Amino acid sequence: MPMRRAIGISIACLVTSACATSEILEESKSNDPVGTPTSIADPVRTVGRSQFGKAVWYDHVGRPTASGEILDTVTATAAHRTLPLASFAKVTNLENGRSVVVKINDRGPYTRGHILDLSPRAADLLDMKGAGVVAVVVEPLVNELLEQPQYFN
C-alpha cells in the first residue's frame, strides 16, 4: 500500500508541474520582452511586496558592478539597495505600462528618492531613455524550481 501511495503522489506532482509549465509558456509567448529570462527551465513568479518609486538609467558601460560583472548594453540589469545580488525583479514603467525582468547585479541608487538604477538595455525596453527618470513598480521574483524567495528588507 505505501508503494501505491508514493506512486500516486509522484504522478500528481508531475501532472501539476506540467500544467504550471504550460501556463508559464503561454504567458511568455503573449508578451515576451527581450530582457525576460523566463523559459520552460526557469519559471518565475512574483513574491513579497511591490515597491513603488522612481527609477533612473545609468550609463557606466564597461565598468564593473558590485557583483563583479561588467555593465554592458546587451543585458537588462539593475542596481537596487536591498535585493540580493543575482536575483531577478520585474520592473514596470507606470507611465506606459511596459515591463521587463532585470537581474540585480549592482548596489544603488545613491540619489534620494530613487529606488532603482537601470542598465541602458533595461531603459530601452521600458522606453524611458528620453525621460531619464520615470515612476516604476519593482516586484521581486522567485525561481519556482529552487523556491528561493527574494524579499525587500
Image: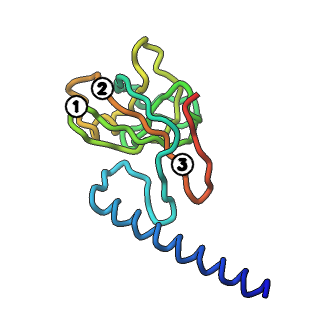
Q: Circle 1 sits in a helix, a strand or a loop, which is it?
A: loop
Q: Amino acid at mark 2?
A: Ala
Q: Residue 65 appears at what percent x and percent y?
A: 53, 30
Q: Which residue is mark 3?
A: 142
Please identify the quadrant where the C terminus is shown: top right
What residue do we see at 51% from left, 59% from top? 42
Left or right: 48 with respect to 118?
right
* Closer to the camera in the image, 45 or 85: 45
* First-in-chain label (3 vs 2): 2
Q: CA distance from mark 1 to mark 3?
A: 26 Å
* Closer to the camera in the image, 152 or 56: 152
Q: Amino acid at mark 3?
A: Val
The residue sitting at the front extreme is 1
Q: Which residue is mark 1?
A: 95
* First-in-chain label (1 vs 3): 1
Q: How many marks?
A: 3
Q: Amino acid at mark 1?
A: Glu
* Closer to the camera in the image, 17 or 38: 17
Q: Residue 79 appears at what percent x and percent y?
A: 47, 29
Q: Which residue is mark 2?
A: 135
* First-in-chain label (1 vs 2): 1
Q: Circle 3 sits in a helix, a strand or a loop, which is it?
A: strand
Mark 1 surroundings within 10 Å by alpha-carbon count, few (fewer than 14), some (14 through 19), many (20 or more): few
Please identify the quadrant where the N terminus is shown: bottom right
| 114 up-or-down from 33: above or below | above
| 102 up-or-down from 28: above or below | above
Q: Residue 128 appears at what percent x and percent y?
A: 25, 31
Question: Could you say which quadrant of the image residue 114 lies in?
Answer: top left
What residue do we see at 38% from left, 27% from top? 52
